[in-house]
Image (cartoon, rainbow, N blue to C red):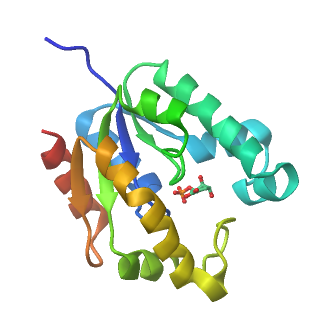
Amino acid sequence: MSEPRSIALIGMMGAGKSTLAPLVAAELKLDWIDIDAQIEARLGKSIVSIFAEDGKEHFRDLESEQLAQSLAKSPAVIATGGGCVLRTKNRDLLAGCRCAYLELPDHELIRRIGDGGNRPLLDANQLSDQISQLLAERTSIYRQLADCTVRIDKPEAPQDTCRRIVAALA
Ligand code: S3P
C-alpha cells in the first residue's frame, strides 16, 4: 500500500482554504495546518504587516520554509496561501501531496473577498481587475498541480464543500 500523503488545499484568495482545512481534516481524521496562520504565529504579526514591513519576497521565503516544515511532519490537511504555488520549489513539494484545487469563477471570488480588507495584494477599488489578472496568471498552475478539482460557482455552506472535497479525494 502507498504511504499516506498530506492533502494540500490550493486555490485563490477567497476560495475558503483556511475554513475548509479543519473540516476536511476532521472528516479524514488528520491534523490540519494553515500556512499563513503558522507564519503569523511565528513572527507575531499579521500577513499584512509582513508584506508592509518586510516585503513580498520575504513573505514568499517564509511561506516556502513553512510549507517545507509542514510537509516534513505527519500527513495533514494543509491550507496553502493562494500564491504558494508560484515558486518552483513549492510546486515540487506540493507535487508530493494530494492537491485539491478549489476553483471559483471571478464573480464568486469577488463576492467572497468583499472589500479586499486584510489582503495585501488587493485593493478594494481595483478588485475585479486584480482578481482577473491573478486568475489569468495562476489558473493553469493550480490545474496542473490538482489531483482533484472542486468547482464552487455559487454560495455554498462549508460543510457541503467539505463533503465534495472528501468525495473528490476518495
Ligand atoms: C496570497 C494569498 C494569501 C496570503 C498572502 C498572499 C496570494 O492567502 O498568503 O496574502 O498571493 O494569493 P489566502 O489565499 O489564504 O488568502
Instruction: Name the residue nearer the viewer: 41 or 17.
Output: 17
Query: Relative to 166, does residue 97 appear above or below in the rendering?
Result: above
Query: Relative to 131, does residue 94 appear above or below in the rendering?
Result: above
Please tell me which residue is depicted at 44% across the width and 57% down the height of the picture. Answer: 138
Locate residue 165, reporting x and y percent: 22, 51
Locate residue 29, reporting x and y percent: 28, 32
- Report whether 140 appears left or right of 169: right
Query: Relative to 75, does residue 134 appear above or below in the rendering?
Result: below
Please tell me which residue is depicted at 50% across the width and 54% down the height of the picture. Answer: 82
Instruction: Name the residue nearer the viewer: 11 or 137.
Output: 137
Locate residue 3, reporting x and y percent: 25, 14
Residue 139, quarter of picture: bottom left
Please tell me which residue is depicted at 47% across the width and 24% down the height of the picture. Answer: 71
Confirm whether residue 14 shows in the render: no
- The quarter of the image holding the N terminus is top left
Residue 157, quarter of picture: bottom left
- Report whether 38 appears left or right of 28: right
> Ligand 1 quadrant?
bottom right
Locate residue 159, reporting x and y percent: 26, 60
Label total for image: 0
